[in-house]
C-alpha cells in the first residue's frame, strides 16, 4: 500500500497541485474570466454530426473499456454534448459499452441529453447497450456494428487498449469521420494514424471545459496548466542542478524527486 | 481500543444462520434506503450523493495522507481498504446483472420480432445460458474447460490476430510522404524498425558499438536514441499532463464541483 509518508515531498506536490486547482475553480466561480485555446478535435464534432445528418447514417460513440471512473465519466460528458447536437438533427446514435457499471450511467446520460435538447421523444432505449466486458468480444461486437450500420461518424473517447486500432480501422474502411481521445498514451499513435482528429494527453480532460465553457471547468483547466508549469519548473531546476558541478545528483532538491 | 478493534467488537463475524440473517437484513435495509431515496426531492438527493461521494473520497485521501506505523506500514484506516474494495465489487456485481439484462432485452426483442440477424441473437442468448450453466454447475468439467479454452480463447485470439492486418493499413496511411512532418516520421520509423531487426543491425555492424564518434551512426544506436531521448520524454510529458488532468477532474468529482454535467442536471 502506498502512503504519503513513503515520499512526503511528492505528496506535498500533489497537495499543492490540488490546492491550485481548487483556487482557480473558486476564482472562476466568483466571476474571473479565463481564456482557453482552441482544440481542433472538438471543433470537428459539429462537422461530424452534420455529415452524419447529410448521409442519414448513425453516429457511433464508444467509451472503450472505461469503467465508472474519471476517464469513463469524462467520456460520457463529451458524449452528452454530441448527443444534444445529434438530437437536434434527429440523428440515430449507437453507444456500445463494455463496463456494466458505466452502462447504467450511460443510459441515463443519453436519456437526459435528449431531454435537455428538448427531444425526449427521440430517445431510443436500444441505442445504448452492454456488449461484453471481454476485450476482444467487445471489439468484435463494435467492429460488427460499424460494418453493418456503416456509421457516418465515430467518436472514440475513453480507455482503449489493443482494440483501439480495430475500431479505428473499421471506421476508416466504412468512410466514417472519426474523432478520438484517450488517456492511454500507447494507443495514441494508432488513433493518430487512423482517425481524422485525435485529442492528445490532457486535451482529453480539457474537452468538457472547452465544450461547456462552464466557469468551474475553465477554472479547473487553468489550474491544470499552472500545475504543468510547476512540474516543468521542477524538472528544469532539477536538470540545471544535476548539470551544475557544485550541486550534482546529490543535491537535496534532486534527491527529493529521485525514485530509488 | 483502536478503530479496528472497536468495529470488530461492534460487528462480530457472523457464522451459521446469522450469515443468512445478516444478508437478509442488509438486503432489506438497501431496499428501504432505495425507496426513501426515490421519494426525496432532487436537491436533497444531490446533497446525499455529494456527501457520500465526499466521504468515500475522504476515506482514500485520509488513508493516503495519515502517517503510518513504520513497523506495520499501516495507519488506522489501512485495515478497512479491502472492505471498502469489497463494497465496490458488490456494487459492480449488481450492475453486471443490469448489463446482462440489457443484452437479453435487446437480443430477446430481436428474436421475438424476427428482425434481421435474429439468428445471431439466438446464438448469443444460447451462448450466455450454456456458459453460465457450465460455469456455475460444471466448473471442473472438461466441457466447461473446452468451451472456455477451445472456443472463447480461440475467438479472442482470432480477433487479436486481425490487428496484424489493421496495423499494415494504418502504417501505410501514417507513413505516406505528404508533408515535411510525415516524411520525418517515415524516416524516424524506418530507422527505429531497422535498428530493431537483425538485417538492419547488419547494415552498420562494421561501425564500433561504442567509444568512437562513428558509433553514434550505428543504426541500433540511432534507433535507441530516438526511443529513449526523443520518444520517452515526449511520452512522459503527455503522462504528466494526464496525471494533473486526472487530479483536477478527481477533485471536481470528489467535491461535487462538476456543474453543468450529468449529476447536476439530474438534481434540477
Image (tube, coloured by chain):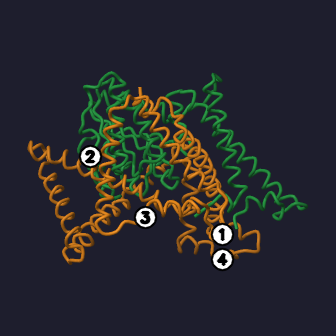
Chain colours: A green, B orange
Compared with residue B245, is residue B214 higher up or lower down, i.e. above or below? below
Q: Is residue A238 visible?
A: yes
| Residue located 50% across and 50% down the image | A188
Q: Position of residue A131 (x, y in %)?
A: 28, 51
Rounded to the nearest whole Å, what is the CA distance between mark 1 and mark 2?
47 Å
Is B141 left or right of A178, judged from the image as shown? left
Where is residue B2, by image quadrant? bottom right
Rounded to the nearest whole Å, what is the CA distance between mark 4 and mark 2?
53 Å
Q: Nearer the viewer, residue A241 or B88?
A: B88
Q: Nearer the viewer, residue B136 or A211?
A: B136
Q: Circle 2 sits in a helix, a strand or a loop, which is it?
A: helix
Residue B12 numbered mark, or none: 3
Which residue is denoted by mark 4 in the rendering? B206
Q: Position of residue B201 (x, y in %)?
A: 58, 73
Compared with residue A97, is residue B203 higher up or lower down, i.e. above or below? below
Q: Position of residue B6 (x, y in %)?
A: 53, 60
* Chain to which the residue tagged by mark 2 belongs: A
Q: Is residue A47 visible?
A: no
Rounded to the nearest whole Å, what is the CA distance between mark 2 and mark 3?
51 Å
What crowding class fits label 4: few (fewer than 14 Cα within 10 Å), some (14-19), or many (20 or more)? Answer: few
Residue B218 numbered mark, or none: 1
Rounded to the nearest whole Å, what is the CA distance between mark 4 and mark 1?
9 Å
Which residue is denoted by mark 2 in the rendering? A145
* Chain to which the residue tagged by mark 3 belongs: B
* Chain to which the residue tagged by mark 4 belongs: B
Amino acid at each position: 500500500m502506498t502512503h504519503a509518508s513513503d515520499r512526503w515531498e511528492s505528496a506535498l506536490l500533489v497537495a499543492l497541485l490540488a490546492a491550485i486547482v481548487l483556487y482557480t475553480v473558486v476564482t472562476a466561480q466568483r466571476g474571473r474570466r479565463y481564456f482557453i485555446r482552441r482544440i481542433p478535435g472538438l471543433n470537428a464534432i459539429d462537422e461530424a454530426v452534420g455529415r452524419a445528418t447529410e448521409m442519414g447514417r448513425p453516429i457511433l460513440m464508444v467509451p472503450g473499456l472505461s469503467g465508472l471512473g474519471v476517464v469513463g465519466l469524462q467520456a460520457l460528458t463529451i458524449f452528452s454534448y454530441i448527443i444534444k447536437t445529434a438530437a437536434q438533427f434527429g440523428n440515430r446514435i449507437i453507444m456500445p459499452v463494455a463496463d456494466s457499471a458505466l452502462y447504467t450511467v450511460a443510459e441515463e446520460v443519453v436519456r437526459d441529453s435528449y431531454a435537455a435538447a428538448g427531444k425526449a421523444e427521440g430517445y431510443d432505449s436500444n441505442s445504448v447497450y452492454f456488449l461484453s466486458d471481454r476485450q476482444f468480444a467487445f471489439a468484435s461486437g463494435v467492429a460488427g456494428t460499424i460494418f453493418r450500420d456503416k456509421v457516418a461518424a465515430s467518436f472514440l473517447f475513453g480507455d482503449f487498449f489493443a482494440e483501439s486500432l480495430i475500431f479505428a480501422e473499421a471506421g476508416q474502411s466504412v468512410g466514417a469521420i472519426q474523432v478520438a481521445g484517450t488517456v492511454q498514451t500507447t494507443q495514441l499513435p494508432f488513433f493518430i494514424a487512423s482517425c481524422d482528429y485525435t485529442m492528445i494527453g490532457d486535451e482529453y480532460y480539457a474537452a468538457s471545459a472547452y465544450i461547456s465553457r462552464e466557469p468551474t471547468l475553465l477554472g479547473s483547466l487553468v489550474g491544470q496548466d499552472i500545475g504543468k508549469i510547476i512540474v516543468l519548473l521542477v524538472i528544469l531546476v532539477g536538470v540545471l542542478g544535476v548539470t551544475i558541478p557544485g550541486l550534482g545528483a546529490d543535491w537535496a532538491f534532486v534527491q527529493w524527486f529521485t525514485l530509488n | 481500543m483502536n478503530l479496528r478493534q472497536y468495529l470488530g467488537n461492534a460487528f462480530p463475524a457472523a457464522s451459521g444462520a446469522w450469515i443468512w440473517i445478516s444478508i437478509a437484513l442488509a438486503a432489506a435495509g438497501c431496499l428501504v434506503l432505495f425507496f426513501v431515496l426515490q421519494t426525496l426531492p432532487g436537491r436533497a438527493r444531490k446533497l446525499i450523493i455529494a456527501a457520500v461521494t465526499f466521504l468515500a473520497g475522504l476515506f482514500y485521501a485520509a488513508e493516503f495522507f495519515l502517517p503510518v506505523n513504520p513497523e506495520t506500514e499501516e495507519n488506522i484506516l489501512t485495515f478497512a481498504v479491502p472492505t471498502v474494495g469489497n463494497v465496490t465489487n458488490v456494487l459492480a456485481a449488481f450492475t453486471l446483472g443490469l448489463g446482462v439484462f440489457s443484452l437479453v432485452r435487446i437480443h430477446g426483442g430481436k428474436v421475438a420480432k424476427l428482425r434481421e440477424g435474429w439468428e445471431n441473437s439466438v446464438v448469443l442468448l444460447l451462448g450466455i445460458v450454456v456458459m453460465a450453466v457450465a460455469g456455475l454447475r460444471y466448473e471442473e468439467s472438461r466441457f466447461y474447460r473446452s468451451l472456455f479454452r477451445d472456443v472463447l480463447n480461440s475467438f479472442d485470439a482470432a480477433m487479436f490476430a486481425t490487428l496484424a492486418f489493421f496495423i499494415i493499413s494504418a502504417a501505410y496511411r501514417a507513413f505516406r510522404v505528404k508533408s515535411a512532418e510525415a516524411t520525418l516520421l517515415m524516416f524516424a520509423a524506418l530507422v527505429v524498425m531497422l535498428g530493431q531487426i537483425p538485417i538492419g543491425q547488419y547494415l552498420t555492424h562494421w561501425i564500433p558499438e561504442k567509444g568512437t564518434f562513428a558509433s553514434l551512426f550505428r543504426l541500433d544506436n540511432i534507433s535507441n536514441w530516438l526511443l529513449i531521448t526523443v520518444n520517452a520524454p515526449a511520452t512522459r510529458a503527455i503522462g504528466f499532463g494526464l496525471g494533473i488532468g486526472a487530479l483536477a477532474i478527481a477533485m471536481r468529482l470528489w467535491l461535487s464541483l462538476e456543474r453543468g454535467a450529468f449529476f447536476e442536471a439530474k438534481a434540477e
